[in-house]
Image (cartoon, helix red, strand yellow):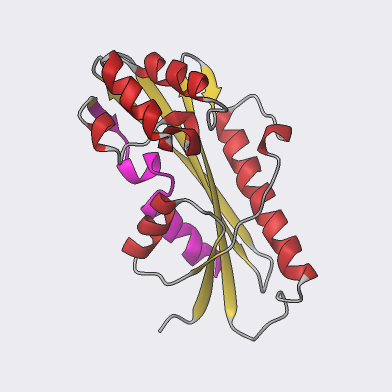
Amino acid sequence: MMSFQIILGSASMARRRLLTEMGYEFRIMTADIDEKSIRMEKPEELVVALAEAKADAIISMLKSTGQLEEGAQERLLITADTVVVSEGKIREKPSSKEEARSFIKGYSGSQAAVVGSVLVTNLKTGKRRGGWERAEVYFHDIPEEVIDSLIEEAITLNVAGGLTLENPLILRFVEAVVGTSDAVMGLPKALTEKLIQEAL
């Protein structure tokens, strides 16, 4: 039995799975923030700022519903954000199928960097610990018909840079990942574990 509770501030299936694999039980809470209103030059700064904004929004929701004062048990809120950097540009979730297509075409025979943040907020003490990780993904040439299939699936619209490595269609064209694949999927496990321990 854990001596603390965890709230995962994310609707991402991949993040859910990774946190479950780490052996934690948790509940999900999500906050709608206007991600486009937060702009930074550096991808590392952007993902950290977005994870902080998500945490602040969830804390406001908990406050307004009187859930912040509940119980003596420590509660940790985990928020995260991921962007892809390709051709020198920061790629967030594509806003259309056309944009998703141009993102994926840009990865073909090339490489992309995935930058992901994790922020752990102790809701009892207010202590916050955050960090980020970067992984490089190298791609073989991706045929047009595979790009078509990926776009049809529409899952590409829900992930940063339209890039989801769990998808068997795209996985075949990944030449190498330098860094951890869990960082690419949105929740670097070792970093998350370290931040949980530091926030307690």
Q: Position of residue 109 (x, y in %)?
A: 29, 13
Q: Quadrant of residue 47?
A: top right
Q: Residue at x 53, y 28 (%)?
A: 94
Which residue is more in the foreground, 100 or 185? 100
Q: Quadrant of the N terminus?
A: bottom left
Q: Residue at x 46, y 13 (%)?
A: 87
Relative side of 43 to 116, left or right: right
Which residue is more in the foreground, 124 or 90? 90
Instruction: Residue lying at the far right in this picture: please name it.
Output: 64
Residue 153 magenta-drawn? no
Q: Residue at x 60, y 27 (%)?
A: 42
Q: Quadrant of residue 179?
A: top left
Total marks shown come to: 0
Which residue is more in the foreground, 193 or 162? 162
Residue 178 magenta-drawn? yes
Work out whether 101 lies above or below 70.
above
Q: Position of residue 131 (x, y in %)?
A: 53, 47
Q: Position of residue 194 (x, y in %)?
A: 44, 58
Work out whether 148 lies above or below 197.
above
- Magenta span covers which residues? 175-200
Work out whether 15 lies above or below 46.
below
Q: Position of residue 105 (x, y in %)?
A: 38, 15
Work out whether 39 lies above or below 52.
above
Q: Quadrant of the C terminus?
A: bottom right
Q: Residue at x 41, y 27 (%)?
A: 113
Relative side of 181 to 173, left or right: right
Which residue is more in the foreground, 57 or 193? 57
Relative side of 54 to 181, left or right: right
